[in-house]
Amino acid sequence: MPKKKAKSVKKANSFTPPEFLVDLLTARSPSGYETEAQAVLEKHVAPVADSFEKDALGNRYATINEGGDPVLMLAGHMDELGLMVKYIDDNGFVYFDTIGGHDPIMISGRRVIIMTAKGDVKGVTGKRAIHLMTPEDRKKVPEFHDLWIDIGAKSRDEALKRIAIGDPAVYDMAFELLHGTVGTARAFDDKAGCYVINETLLRLAKSKKKLAAKVVAVSTTQEEIGTRGATTSTYQVNPHLGIAVDVGHATDHPDCDPRKHGRQVQGGGPIIGRGPNINPFIFERLIEVAVKNNIPHQVESEPRPTPTDARAIQMARGGVAASIISIPLRYMHTPSEVVDLMDIEHTVQLLVAFAESLKPGEHGIW
């Protein structure tokens, strides 16, 4: 008798993440040193956009449907947290400043890569071991000057042959899937948002639906040190409507009180902000298209200016109708942030539907 064919078994982790997203997550781009992320955008986005421009701050502008009305700006920052070489002692140990907001408890014992003009230099962040601390020392949060990077050098002179003052560094933590569509990476904040706005533009460019709006996807720089790229790029684009896409706190984990931080869950879809930083026309339209297209979504209260590019977009020139959409993320500003990639996909779907819904003259005036 002929053998029966074995039934195909779907692997538990058969999900394949988008190449574009993985390329962005792999790129090292601390604020002010965004070159690798820029190269990824030039590879994946420039060939499809009607125009692809850059500026003195390193922002990248991808535009489709030039001459459309309204002008819709989508912003996602390509920079990430990092470290910067500040001082090297006589024994070759490297002291650093932080780029962006770090939790000092998280830094020690991490593998890092120092990005130099001569190539990558690997190191490990160090501090005094717990065995060598007094009981009082163990209770203290280390200060940054109590931490260093060990690159295996024996002297300052040896270290300076390999690295230079001002060289940036990032954690040596690669992207990987944990299970199903849930992944971990060094910099989902905000490579996830940068991917979303550009993937939205790519899908709109390939869609057969007629688009009324001019759409500009701006991959901004230096958000982590003060929304600097968004400030200048919004002035440059001069949009009617501006939506920033960033990560937000998923609060569905232990030790997070929803009475203080609201309830936003990983896997629940994009988080749509509501409050003074969010234009009511955009908020209502986002909810409308999400419901119409069965896109899972959540709402978060934002009672003050958000610490995102949306803050800068809203206050540019004479004022812009702005909004913030957040991708639920756990363990923000740590070396291993966690995101469900389906939340990223649903955010793309939401923005595509929003852009396609716009009609001429819809400028967010209220």
Image (cartoon, grey):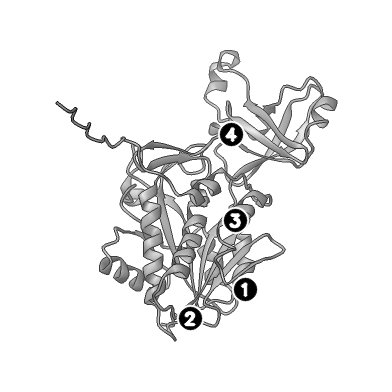
At 57% from the left and 80% from the top, the residue drawn is: 318
Which quarter of the figure is the N terminus placed in?
top left
Which quarter of the figure is the C terminus placed in?
bottom left
Seen as rendered, the residue at the extreme top is: 131
Q: Which amino acid, by three-letter code, is at mark 3?
A: Lys
Task: Tell me the mark number nearer the camera, choosing from 4 and 1.
Answer: 4
The residue singled out by tag 3 in the image is 43
Could you tell me which secondary element the residue under label 3 belongs to? helix
In the rendered structure, the answer to whether residue 184 lies left or right of residue 8 reads right
User: How far across and down, in percent of the image, does residue 289 sit?
Assistant: 31, 70
Picture layout, residue 31 above or below residue 167: below
Task: Tell me the mark number nearer the camera, choosing from 4 and 3.
Answer: 3
At 34% from the left and 40% from the top, the residue drawn is: 180
Front residue of this view, candidates 257 and 168: 168
Task: Tell me the mark number nearer the camera, choosing from 1 and 2.
Answer: 2
Q: CA distance from mark 4 to mark 3?
A: 23 Å
Mark 2 crowd level (few <14, some 14–19, many ≥20, 10 Å Cα): many
